[in-house]
Amino acid sequence: MAWGAVEGPAGADFDALTVAAIAEHPFGPITFTGDRWALQDVRLVAPILPSKVVAVGKNYADHAHEMGGEAPASPVIFLKPSTTIIGHGDTIRLPVSDRVDHEAELAVVIGKPARDVGREDALSYVLGYTCANDVTARDQQKADVQFTRGKSHDSFCPIGPWIETVLDPSDLRVTASVNGQLRQDGRTKDMIHDVATLISFMSNVMTLLPGDVILTGTPAGVGPINAGDTVTIEIEGIGVLSNKVASK
């Protein structure tokens, strides 16, 4: 496996894009090796393996209401382990559960250590953005009255297909479809706490390290997924994250 930069004109078809190999890593000045491949000849894996995934619950008012509650005044955060991470095209594996839901989310990838960051400087700590699916065993979440077990099964955090490094996260369309049927359709402008606020809040709780991922919450429309389904998350300006669903 290796790091690479996806290259091509804006709006180009997938088969017109190329990948330029990066010598070491994307944190700091980037050096290219000179190797280049067609994107269609490359297998995309998860674009980052973080030390931690920090997520926020009920960050869209419509989702808070559909879950039977009010939007919280301050961000409600929780952690997902790095073992939940899978990439575009990988398989979501279902545990024994009465209901497992999809949750389409904008993911923020941290680019440099962040501790006690002010909101006004927060976006300067961002490497880029990607698509995420905060997969949740809803029955386990409700039974435990907290998030850890229901959010932490292996394969429960698909991210990808890549990290978009030049993007304004303030007003992007976020959708989720299951087997081609649209389930979620929201915009990041409707977040209760925006990206800068989340980075500042979280960095005042814990140090965010390069490669750490922040999940920014999901709009209304979450729903169940089952073995045999295909879940597709699409975010404007980033791309498409698609994963099959299978039994464990």
Image: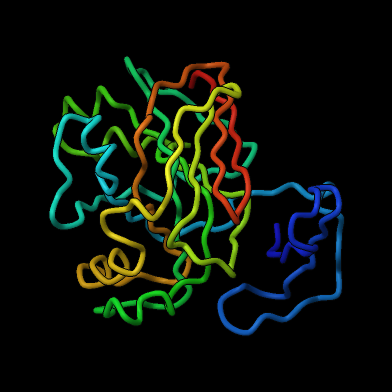
Residue displayed at 46% across by 40% down: 133
Q: Quadrant of the N terminus?
A: bottom right
Residue displayed at 55% across by 22% down: 181
230 up-or-down from 42: above or below? above
**What x and y, as percent, mark residue 20?**
79, 67
**What x and y, as percent, mark residue 165?**
58, 68
Name the residue nearer the viewer: 29 or 59.
Answer: 59
Residue displayed at 61% across by 36% down: 242
Is residue 192 left or right of 185 when viewed as pictured?
Answer: left
Is residue 4 left or right of 187 when viewed as pictured?
Answer: right
As drawn, the residue found furthest toward the bottom would be 29
Residue displayed at 86% across by 53% down: 16
**What x and y, as percent, mark residue 35?**
86, 69
Toward which corner of the image does residue 67 lie, by quadrant?
top left
**What x and y, as percent, mark residue 48?**
54, 58
87 up-or-down from 48: above or below? above
